[in-house]
Image (tube, rainbow, N blue to C red):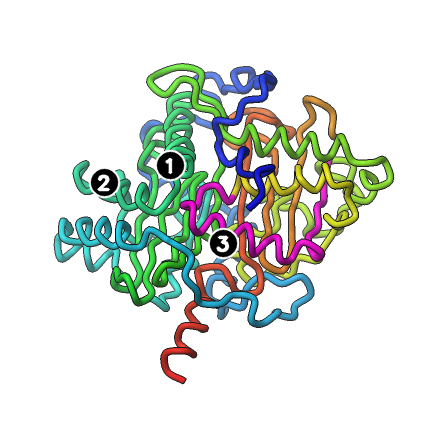
Amino acid sequence: MSAEYVEHRSDAFDSGKTWKNDFREYIPPAGHPRIHGLDKVTVHSYSRDVLSRPRPQSLFAPWYQNWEKPFIGITCDNTKIRDLYSVKEEGAPTSEMVAAAETLLSSFSPDELFKCCFDIDSVEWRKWANPEIMFNDIGIRLEAMDPRKRDLVLDLLRSSLSPNGFEKALGAMRTNQFLGELVNARPILNEYSYHFLLFGQPSVATPWGFLLFGHHLCLSVFVLGKQMVISPMFVGAEPNVIDSGPYKGTALFLPESELALKLMQSLPPDLQAVAQIYKKMHDPAMPEGRWHPADQRQLSGAAQDNRVIPYEGVLAISMPSAQQDYLRSIIATYMGILPSGPFNARMAQIQSHWPETYFSWIGAFGEEDPFYYRIQSPVVLIEFDHHAGVFLLNAEPSTCHVHTIIRMPNGGDYGRELLGAWRSQKYY
C-alpha cells in the first residue's frame, strides 16, 4: 500500500480550503408546505401517507419489484464476471465483532430476537433504503430500543469499522438529527432513525453479518472468518455540516469533494472532455431514465442490485501519474471506513484492476460548482452526487447536500460471492 493514499483516509482531512455552505439560505420557514405538520406525525403514518400518493407510487413501484428479483449483482454489460472474489485471510477484527454481537443478542428479549434475526440467505438483507420514508418495516428501529441496547448496537458498529469510519457513520446520524431540528421534523429525522437486522449466527469461522439502514446511512456488513465486506454502503447528509449545538464542527465529505475537484481540474483538457460525460447536472442530452427524481444522477442506489451500468469516462491508466494518485486517494477516503486489514486488502484488490478503472464526471468543475462523479471497475463502483433539496428549499443541486454510495459489482455486494466461494470449498 503506497503512502499517497494512506494520508487521505480520514474525514478530518483539512487542506485549509473554506467550502461555501449556504444551507441556512434554504431552511423552510415555519408552516411551509414542505415541512408542515412533520412535528406531529410518526414515521409509520408519514410513510403510509407518502407512499399512498400517485407520484411516489409511480416512482417507487420499480423498487419493490426489484427487491423481489433474484440477486445477480451490478454489471457493466449484463454479463457477470466470475471468480473476482475469493476466501482469504485479511485481518478483519472478527473476534471483537463476534463478542460485541453476542453481547447485543444476549440483551434482547425473545420478541426482539424474532424481529431482528434472519437466515444468512434472507432476502431482507437487500431491502434497505436511504430515504426517510419507511419502505420496509423490518428489523428493530433504534429509536424504539432501550438506550442501553441501542448503545450495544453502536458498540457492534464501532468494532466493525475503523475509528474514522465509525465517526463518519455517527456524523451521518448526527446530521440527520440536525436536519430534523432545522425543519422541525424530529419524528422522522433523528439520530436513531435506523433499522437493525442481524443475519446468521455470529462466529469467528462461519458467515454472518448485519444491516443498519435509514435516512442517509445504510451499511451492509458481511463477515467470513478474517474477511469482511461493507457493501452496499450509502452515506449522505443534508446539510453536510453542523454549525450549532453539541456536535458543532461536524463536517462530512470534504476530502471526497476536494480531491475529486482537484483531479478533474488538473486533468489535461483532452481527458477532461472524455471524463465529463454531461456538462449540466440535469442535462437535456441525458437519455430517459438517466436522471431519477429520488436518486437524481446516482445509478446504484436502493433496489438497484442488478442494474446494468456501462463504463463511462476516462480510463485511470490514461491519466498522468499525479492524477492517478489523486484517484487512488479519492478511493481511499471511501475505503477508509474499513478496519486496517480489510482496508489494505480492498485497496490491493482495486489496484489489481487499475487498467479497467474508469472515472466519469457530470456538471461543471469550478470552485463552487455542484457535481457528480463515478469511479467504476469490475470490483468497485463509487458514486458521489450533490443533490437538490429534499427538506431544504434549494431547487438545484447544492454542495450542502451530498449522497455517496459504494458497491462491489459482479456479485460482491452483501458478500454473496464470498459466501458462494466458501460453500463451494466447504461442501465440494
Q: Could you tell which of marks 1 and 3 lies nearer the N-terminus?
A: 1
Return the residue at label 1.
Answer: 163
The Cα–Cα distance between marks 1 and 3, rounded to whole angstroms, is: 18 Å
Where residue 41 appears, x then y in whole percent?
Answer: 33, 34
- Residue 355 located left or right of residue 338: right
Q: Among all residues in the image, which is located at the extreme front?
A: 2
Q: Residue furthest right?
A: 270
Question: What amino acid is at disc 3?
Answer: Ala
Q: Amino acid at mark 2?
A: Arg
For mark 2, what is the residue?
Answer: 150
The residue lying at 36 percent from left, 21 percent from top is 247
Element type at marker 2?
Answer: helix
Disc 1 from disc 2: Cα separation: 19 Å
- Residue 356 magenta-highlighted: yes
Closer to us: 420 or 149: 420
Classed neighbour count for the residue bearing mark 2: other residues with Cα under 10 Å, few (<14), some (14–19), many (≥20): some
Q: Is residue 177 visible?
A: yes
- Point out the tag, 2 or 3, that comes first from the N-terminus: 2
Q: Can you tell which quarter of the image residue 177 is in?
A: top left
Query: For residue 175, what is the image quadrant?
Result: top left
**Of tags 2 and 3, which is closer to the observer?**
3
Circle 3 residues within 10 Å: few <14, some 14–19, many ≥20: some
Between 348 and 203, the one lying in front of the other is 348
> Which residue does the numbered mark 3 point to in the structure image?
345
Element assignment for label 3: helix
Which amino acid is tagged 1? Pro
Q: Which residues are magenta?
A: 335-364
Residue 54 on image: x %, y %: 53, 48
